[in-house]
Image (cartoon, rainbow, N blue to C red):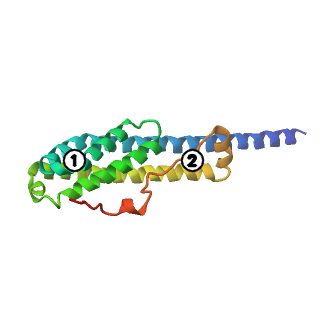
Amino acid sequence: MNYFIILTLVVVLIIVVALIYLYNRLVRARNQLREAWSGMEVQLKLRHDLVPSIVAVVKGYATHEEELLTAVTRERNLAAEVTSSADLAAAAEKKLGHEMLTVLALKENYPTLKADQGFRDLMKELVSIEDQIQYARRYYNGSVRDLNNAIETFPSSVVAGVFGFVLASPFEVESLTERLSPTVKI
């Protein structure tokens, strides 16, 4: 009889330790995802801070591109206002990124803009920020993958369901047209 009680206690202890381990693994993955999104937000804020300078420089050269510059400013403001979820913020940032690509394409139509030292300095800074956003996006998407794998694999899927862990969405380009270079019509 003592062996049965000891065996039962050992099995219960193993199950409890396994549940604790799986729960902690899910919490670590969720916290890594939060940290990754925080890194994205830092880089996106740098881009937001740079947008007004770029728009101001481009306005001096491209007065008839007012609609595009207004769209960029509008998308920047919309992206800056989104704080409720990573999914909403990612959608807003994608739109802003696409509008910024269109502004960058303007330099091909304005040789004097392309030659302006202030514009070139801003473009170098923007390229650097976009590179950092790309790295942060990769880290974030890797964290999304890790969390989603932990949530969807057995037996941690049971623990995830009990404790309310939810799948995360990656930060990605949604359509093929967003991957293409923008065209600028004058």
Q: Is residue 7 left or right of residue 29?
A: right
Q: Residue at x 52, y 45 (%)?
A: 29
Percent position (x, y) of residue 130? 29, 52
Q: Which quarter of the figure is the N terminus placed in?
A: top right
Could you say which is closer to the camera, residue 129 or residue 156?
A: 129
Q: Residue at x 33, y 53 (%)?
A: 98
Per the image, label 2 sits on a secondary structure element best described as loop
Could you say which is closer to the camera, residue 30 or residue 122?
A: 122
Question: Among all residues in the image, which is located at the extreme right?
Answer: 1
Give me the disc on residue 125: none
Q: Label 2: how many residues lie within 10 Å, few (<14), some (14-19) or many (20+)?
A: some
Q: Residue at x 17, y 57 (%)?
A: 107
- Of tags 1 and 2, which is closer to the observer? 1
Name the residue carrying label 1: 66
CA separation in Å, label 1 and label 2:
41 Å
Q: Is residue 145 left or right of residue 53?
A: right
Q: Quadrant of residue 179?
A: bottom left
Percent position (x, y) of residue 90? 42, 46
Q: Which quarter of the figure is the C terminus placed in?
A: bottom left
Mark with earlier residue (1, 2): 1
Per the image, label 1 sits on a secondary structure element best described as helix
The three-letter code of the residue at mark 2 reads Leu
Q: Quadrant of residue 40?
A: top left
Name the residue carrying label 2: 167
Q: Is residue 113 left or right of residue 174?
A: left
